[in-house]
């Protein structure tokens, strides 16, 4: 089927590429001319695992085209709206991009169109969209509006699209439901060439859930707010664990064994970031407020999360005594691993706070440095974790990138000014890092002091290393 996608961000680009992957003929529109020219010349404007490969396959098969919104509106009967809905100062979602697309469709489209909201929008946006299209359409537009919320996690968006637990469509007509079922048929049946796994298992049996539009819009905000609540809950428990000497890892493990709770999203840390949870929680609070419903529970979820970075800075002050003049290394800038997205990332707020305290900051992130530079120009960006650790009074782990699990701690011990690791993502066990000669502080667990043998080893290694450096410099 010819399908149009408007918006080529994380959601739009993944949606366009995956719809092409499952066999559709997709036209994707992007209004940012720089991003559009990159896409048209096969250059990725963002990092998302597997996405580049999927786009390449689709372009080679001539099933994925990039251009303007006007061309997209003419292209397919189904139009997915995947434009940004960023938060306004008061927490409301900014729907101006959605409104712009609706106006363009109303003025240009003739014949039938199924207009599908994939962007995360407040409940009743679909009803608003529908009214808008009927008032503004001048070309004999016959249309349906549907909600099809995305449940894509950055870092696994391609996988989440192709192997979803559920596909939710909110429709107000049988015609729209039928068309959406046709679009998603290959995913429902899990029948397509999977670009992620070689021998693709039928790893999911997706549920195709058909609801009314408003219910579908609410499912998205309610799901994200619930997951955010889970995270703030375990972070609150982590604070108590630190106060009473319990181990939050064990508490979370014990809780997660109850299938009604489940282990996922019970990892305590420096807080949730990204372009979804923070803004979706705020938007949900505003939606409830405007409907005169009391969502004070979510206000607390947001407050707990806002406080995480401040608490982390207090931990650093507790360990360094005087932060001014110290050098700290930040490992990880993206809001989570396997993405280059730094929007609402705790690392950005943390770095700014440390700079305000008079510390100097060196940072390393495998892919997010470029995007971080735009919002955090005055720190030192390093080529790897070692370079960031050189001369550091503290190593701060803020994003749990897999590569941080495979570092040479002996080498790190010889490079740091002080052997101190403060881990905001509980990546390691206290024993492991203290066994390498570092003091180790984390979240919701007792700190660990360096083991004497490791310190002795470290001294030996350091002197041997120093001798080696001297020999090399003499040579
Ligand atoms: C989220 C939802 O998971 C996804 O379904 C929705 O479509 C979009 O929003 P995303 O924002 O990409 O996806 O990332 P996610 O993996 O959910 O993590 C969000 C934040 O929560 C990250 O900063 C992560 O570090 C943090 N997190 C996650 C925790 O602090 N603890 C956890 O246990 C899990």
Image (cartoon, grey):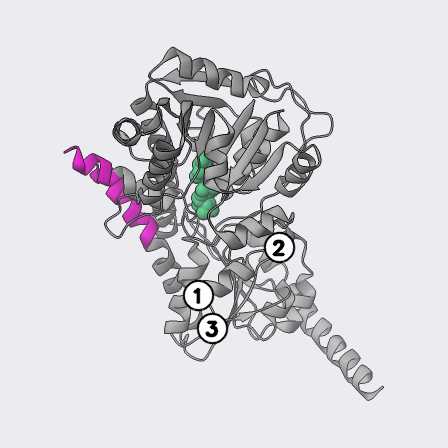
Please name the residue that numbered disc 2 is placed on: 404
Compare residues 324 and 240 and report the one nearer the observer: 324
Label 2: few (<14), some (14–19) or many (≥20) C-alpha neighbours in 10 Å: some
Of circles 1 and 3, the one toward us is 3
**What is the residue that sits farthest to the top in this orientation?**
174
| Left or right position of 165 against 357 | right
Disc 3 is placed on an element classified as loop
Residue 434 lies, in percent from the top left, at 58, 59
Compare residues 29 and 73 and report the one nearer the observer: 73
- Residues drawn in magenta: 285-306
Compare residues 249 and 155 and report the one nearer the observer: 155
Please name the residue that numbered disc 3 is placed on: 378
**What is the residue that sits farthest to the bottom in this orientation?**
474
Mark closest to the chain's N terminus, 1 or 2 = 1
Quadrant location of residue 192? top right
Mark closest to the chain's N terminus, 1 or 3 = 1
> Residue 223: within the magenta?
no
Residue 99 lies, in percent from the top left, at 32, 39
Please say if the residues under marks 3 and 2 sit with CB atoms less than 8 Å apart. no
Label 3: few (<14), some (14–19) or many (≥20) C-alpha neighbours in 10 Å: some
Please name the residue that numbered disc 1 is placed on: 351
**What is the residue that sits farthest to the right in this orientation?**
475
> Residue 300: within the magenta?
yes
Residue 441 lies, in percent from the top left, at 48, 58
Q: Quadrant of the C terminus?
A: bottom right
């Amino acid at each position: 089927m010819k399908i149009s996608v408007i918006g080529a961000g994380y959601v739009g680009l993944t949606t366009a590429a995956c719809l092409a992957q499952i066999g559709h003929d997709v036209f994707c529109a992007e209004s940012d001319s720089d991003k559009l020219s990159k896409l048209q010349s096969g250059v990725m404007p963002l990092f998302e695992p597997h996405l580049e490969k999927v786009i390449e396959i689709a372009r080679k098969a001539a099933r994925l085209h990039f251009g303007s919104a006007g061309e997209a509106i003419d292209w397919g009967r189904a139009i997915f709206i995947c434009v940004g809905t960023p938060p306004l100062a008061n927490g409301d979602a900014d729907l101006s991009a959605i409104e712009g697309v609706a106006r363009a469709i109303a003025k240009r489209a003739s014949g039938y169109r199924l207009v599908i909201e994939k962007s995360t929008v407040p409940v009743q946006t679909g009803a608003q969209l529908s009214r808008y299209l009927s008032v503004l359409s001048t070309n004999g537009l016959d249309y349906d509006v549907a909600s099809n919320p995305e449940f894509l996690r950055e870092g696994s968006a391609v996988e989440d699209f192709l192997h979803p637990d559920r596909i939710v469509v909110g429709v107000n007509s049988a015609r729209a439901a039928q068309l959406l079922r046709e679009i998603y048929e290959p995913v429902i049946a899990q029948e397509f060439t999977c670009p992620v796994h070689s021998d693709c298992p039928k790893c999911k049996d997706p549920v195709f859930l058909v609801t009314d539009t408003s219910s579908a819009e609410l499912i998205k905000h309610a799901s994200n707010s619930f997951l955010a609540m889970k995270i703030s809950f375990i972070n609150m428990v982590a604070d108590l664990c630190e106060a009473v000497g319990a181990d939050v890892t064990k508490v979370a493990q014990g809780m997660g064994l109850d299938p009604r709770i489940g282990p996922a999203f019970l990892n305590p840390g420096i807080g949730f970031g990204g372009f979804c949870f923070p803004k979706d929680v705020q938007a949900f609070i505003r939606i409830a407020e405007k409907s005169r419903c009391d969502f004070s529970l979510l206000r607390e979820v947001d407050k707990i999360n806002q406080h995480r970075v401040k608490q982390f800075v207090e931990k650093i002050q507790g360990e360094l005594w005087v932060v001014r003049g110290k050098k700290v290394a930040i490992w990880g800038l993206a809001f989570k691993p396997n993405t280059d997205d730094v929007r609402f990332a705790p690392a950005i707020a943390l770095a700014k706070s440390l700079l305000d305290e008079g510390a100097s900051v060196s940072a390393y992130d495998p892919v997010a440095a470029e995007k971080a530079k735009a919002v955090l120009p005055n720190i030192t960006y390093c080529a790897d974790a070692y370079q960031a650790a050189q001369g550091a009074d503290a190593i701060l782990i803020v994003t749990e990138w897999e590569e941080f699990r495979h570092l040479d701690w002996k080498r790190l011990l010889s490079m740091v000014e002080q052997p101190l690791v403060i881990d905001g993502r509980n990546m390691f066990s206290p024993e492991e890092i203290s066994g390498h000669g570092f003091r180790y502080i984390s979240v919701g667990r007792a700190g660990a002091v360096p083991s004497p043998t490791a310190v002795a080893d470290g001294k030996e290694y350091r002197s041997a290393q120093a001798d080696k450096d001297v020999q090399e410099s003499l040579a």
